[in-house]
Amino acid sequence: MPEMSRSQLVVYAAVAVALLLVGARAIRGEDAAEPSFAAASGGGGRGASFSVRGSGGDLVVHVAGAVGRPGVYRMPIGSRVDDAVRRAGGAAPRAELEAINLAAKLADGQQVVVPERVPGGGAVAAIGAGEEGPISLGTATAEQLEEIEGIGPVTAGDIIEFRDERGGLSSIDQLDQVPGIGPATMESLRARLQP
């Protein structure tokens, strides 16, 4: 067998090291390729770090609004909005839990917004008194939505279903994702609804 030159030995050693690194990464699985993110915990600017894993048994949700520790959380598949609120430190004293569907199943990438209680007894009582004030999107009934120009029974039902699937909405502008709502209807909604 002919003797190898020094440059050939270096090339073979580099190939062997590369193969070892690829093999070690394959043995470790997907852990090496997972992204890691940092999120502000909302408490005095302190950061909390967490890792988002692509495992088949988890989903990632963002819990915001009137909760103890707003942030991004990993939850088991099949979890409910109530589970996410509890994971985020529970509802704050000012939370209006009746405005969201706590029993709704969570979806990967969902944002759960827990609204704050409206000062003065809430918007629902004001509407019941016959005033023309804004309707709370979080607690609006189909009948209240149908009072808005351009909203019929089908669209009102679609809005409520859309709201409940997401565990609440943080903005009226999110309603433009509901089929059948165009620019003119969005203007009517902005005039009559509040988040």
Image (tube, grey):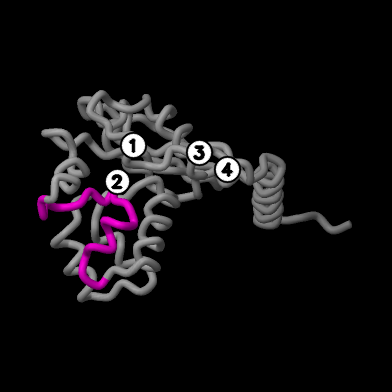
The reply to whether residue 68 is in sight is: yes
Q: Where residue 51 appears, x then y in whole percent?
A: 47, 37
Q: Which one is in front in this view, the residue at disc 1 or the one at disc 3? A: 1
Q: Which one is in front in this view, the residue at disc 4 or the one at disc 3? A: 3
What residue is shown with label 4? 32
What residue is shown with label 3? 80
**Residue contact at pointers 2 and 1, CB within 8 angstroms:** yes
Q: Nearer the viewer, residue 129 or 195?
A: 129
Q: Where residue 32 appears, x then y in whole percent?
A: 57, 43
Range of magenta residues: 131-150
Residue appearing at x 13%, y 50% in the figure: 130
Marks 1 and 3, the one that precedes in the sequence: 3
Q: Which one is in front in this view, the residue at disc 4 or the one at disc 2? A: 2
What amino acid type should be assigned to the residue bearing mark 2? Thr
**Residue contact at pointers 1 and 3, CB within 8 angstroms:** no
What amino acid type should be assigned to the residue bearing mark 4? Ala
Instruction: Estimate the spatial distance between the alpha carbons at disc 1 and disc 3, rounded to whole Å.
Output: 15 Å
How many discs mark residues in the rendered view? 4
For the N terminus, which image quadrant? bottom right
Residue 146 vs 120, above or below: the answer is: below
Instruction: Estimate the spatial distance between the alpha carbons at disc 1 and disc 4, rounded to whole Å.
Output: 42 Å
Q: Give the quarter of the image for residue 70.
A: top left
Q: Which one is in front in this view, the residue at disc 2 or the one at disc 3? A: 2
What residue is shown with label 2? 139
Q: Circle 4 — which element?
A: helix
Residue 183 vs 137, above or below: the answer is: below
Marks 2 and 3, the one that precedes in the sequence: 3
Marks 4 and 2, the one that precedes in the sequence: 4
Q: Circle 2 — which element?
A: loop
